[in-house]
Amino acid sequence: MSEHKVFSMAFSKIYALYVQKAMKKNRTEAEVVQIICWLTAYRPEEVKKQVSSGNDFASFFAAAPKINPNTSLIKGGVCGVRVDEIEDPLMRNIRYLDKLIDELAKGKAMVNILRN
């Protein structure tokens, strides 16, 4: 089975797209970082280091301290696929992040995005 193209994409490119999407909807880069930190347990300075490192998405998630145990609360679809039904762990984590950024761009409150 071939690897998904997104796995080898530079995290910095995807990060820039996340920030751009958020800012178009009057949200901030700090909120994007907060979401990434919630999902992966990276500290904000570690997220910035990952952005500048040139790592791909697979390496970014492989190096993550841990995935938040509350990801099971993330429901719904992104790109026509239900995130809670994705079997590949890496793809599921990528889609969780996509879903959280989508919720940010749609104006959802951070307390709800972070499943608090």
Image: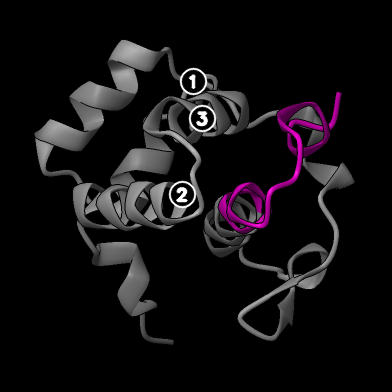
**For the residues marked 1 and 2, what is the alpha-carbon distance in whole angstroms?**
25 Å
**For the residues marked 2 and 3, what is the alpha-carbon distance in whole angstroms?**
8 Å
- Choose the circle earlier in sequence order: 3 or 1: 3
- The residue singled out by tag 3 in the image is 31
Magenta region, residue range: 100-116
- Residue sitting at 49 percent across and 44 percent down? 26
Q: Quadrant of residue 81?
A: bottom right
Q: Quadrant of residue 55?
A: top left
Q: Are marks 2 and 3 in contact (CB under 8 Å)?
A: yes
Residue 54 on image: x %, y %: 11, 43
- Residue sitting at 51 percent across and 53 percent down? 25
**Kind of residue at disc 1:** Pro
Judging from the image, what secondary structure is the residue with disc 3 in?
helix
- The residue singled out by tag 2 in the image is 22
**Kind of residue at disc 2:** Ala
**For the residues marked 3 and 1, what is the alpha-carbon distance in whole angstroms?**
19 Å
In the image, is 96 to the left or to the right of 12?
right
- Residue sitting at 34 percent across and 64 percent down? 7
**Kind of residue at disc 3:** Glu
Judging from the image, what secondary structure is the residue with disc 1 in?
loop
Q: Is residue 95 above or below residue 33?
A: below
- The residue singled out by tag 1 in the image is 65
Colour mode of the rendering: one colour
Q: Quadrant of the C terminus?
A: top right
Q: Is residue 102 magenta?
A: yes
Q: Are marks 3 and 1 in contact (CB under 8 Å)?
A: no
In the image, is 108 to the left or to the right of 37?
right
